[in-house]
Amino acid sequence: MYMSASGGISLPFTAIRAESFSLGPLHCAAQPSQAASESITQDSATMADIDNKDQAELDPADMEDVEEVEEEETGEDVNSKARQLTVQMMQNPQILAALQERLDGLVGSPSGYMESLPKVVKRRVNALKNLQVKCAHIEAKFYEEVHELERKYAALYQPLFDKRSDIVKASYEPTDEECEWKADEEEELTVSKKEEMKEKAKVEEEKKDEEKEDPKGIPEFWLTVFKNVDLLSDMLQEHDEPILKHLQDIKVKFSDPGQPMSFSLEFYFEPNEFFTNTILTKTYKMRSEPDESDPFSFDGPEIMGCTGCTIDWTKGKNVTFKTIKKKQKHKGRGTVRTVTKTVPNDSFFNFFTPPEVPESGELDEDSEAVLAADFEIGHFIRERIVPRAVLYFTGEAIEDDDDDYDEEGEEADDEEGEEEADEENDPDYDPKKDANPPAECKQQ
C-alpha cells in the first residue's frame, strides 16, 4: 500500500483474494561500514603473516625438496587455505554485515547498460515501453471486471450474512439441526471426558440461570470480534466498549453498475443512549486506471479518498472529545482562574471523521500516514472481518494466523540447526580461531 503519483493509495491485491496485499519492503543501498572494512583488511593481513612466518622457518638447504612437494600439492594447499579463510570470514559477524550491506546495495542498482545502447536500440526499447503502457490499461480493465464479479457474489453472500445478523441480535432462533456442529477428529474427546465436561457445564449453566435471565442472541458479538483483532483493538478505548456493545451488524455495499468504483462499510446499531444514528457509514472511493504522468506505477486499484458521516451524539456522550480544566494565574494581580477547554480524544469513532484529501491531492506526512492506516483498516474490514466474523469471534481465524508464524519460526530453527551441523562436520573448522563470537554471546 503506497501513495501514487496522483495522490491515491495503491492496493496491490490479487484477483482471487484481495486481502493478499502486503506492504513492500524498502531497500536502502548502503556501503560497508569502516569497522567492517578494517576487519576484512586485518584478517587478510593475518593470513599473509602466517604464510610469511611458515616460509621463514624453513631451512634454505631444504628449499628444493620443499618446492618439489609444493609443485605436487599446490592445488590441495590452495583449496585448504581458501576453505580456512572462508570459514574464518563466515565466523566474523562484522565481515558478514559488510557483505550483507554490499549485497543490499546491489539490489535495484541500474547496470548502466541502457545508457550504452545505440540510439536505434533505444528507439526499439521505447516501443516496448509503449506496449507496457497498453498492458497497464488492459490490467486496469481486468480489475474493473473483478470489481463487477465482487458485486455479483456479494449479492449471493448477503442472505447468509443477514441470517447471521438475525441470530446475533435474537431476531431468529436457529433450529437444533442448524446448531449441530461436527467437530474435527482432533477436537473429539473421550467419552469420560465428555461426560465430565457436560456435568461441569450443566452446573455452571444452572448457576448462571439463577443469577440472570437467558441471554438473547449472541451478546457483544462484534465487540468481541474487534477486541480479538490487533488491528482493530488498537483503535478501541475503554469508553468505546459500552457503545460497541450496541453494534448489531456490519455490511459492505459496492457501487452500482456504471458508477465510479467504490465501496461502503455500514455499521448498524440498536437504539442506544450515546447517539441517535441507527447506521454509521464510511465510503471509500477507488480508481482503476493508470496515471498518465506515471503509468508504470499502476499496481491495481487505488483508494483515492474516503468520507465518513456525521454522528448525532447525545449531549454529554460524545467520546471523540474530552473536557479538560486548566488553571491560569494573572501575572499582575496574581489571581487564579479556571479555564475549561474541549480537546480531541482518542476513540474508535474517529474512524468516521477521516482527514480530507485536498483537490491538489497533496498531503502532509501525518495526514498521509493517517489515511494509509485508515485505508488498510477499511480494506481489512471489507475483506476479512465481514466475511469471516464468526471465526474472529471464536478466535479460530487468529489461531490460523498464529500457526503460520509458528511454521516460519520452526523453519528458521531448522536452518540454524543445519548451520551448526555444518560447522561440526567441517574438518577445517577450528573454534579457537573464532575470535569474534556473536555480540549476544559475549559476557557483560
Image: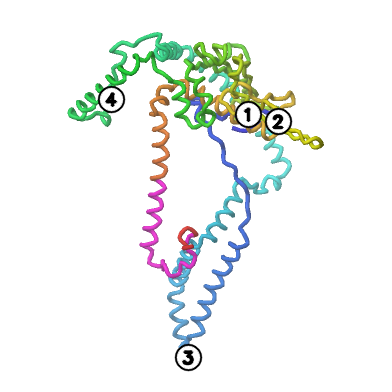
* SS class, disc 4: loop
Q: Earlier in the sequence, mark 3 or mark 4?
A: 3
Frontmost of labels 1 and 3 is 1
- Left or right, 15 with respect to 352, comes to left
Q: Which mark is residue 183?
A: 4
Distance in Å between CA atoms under marks 2 and 4: 51 Å
| Tag 4 near tag 1, CB within 8 Å | no
* SS class, disc 2: loop
Residue 260 falls in which quadrant of the image? top right
What segment is highlighted magenta in the picture?
Answer: 411-438
| Residue type for callout 3 | Ala
Q: Earlier in the sequence, mark 4 or mark 1?
A: 4
Q: Position of residue 245 (x, y in %)?
A: 47, 19
Residue 154 visible: yes
Distance in Å between CA atoms under marks 1 and 3: 82 Å
Q: Position of residue 45 (x, y in %)?
A: 56, 72
**CA neighbours of label 2 inside 10 A, class few (<14), some (14 to 19), many (20+):** some
**Residue identifier under label 2:** 363
* SS class, disc 3: helix
Q: Residue at x 56, y 36 (%)?
A: 23
Q: Nearer the viewer, residue 300 or 411?
A: 411
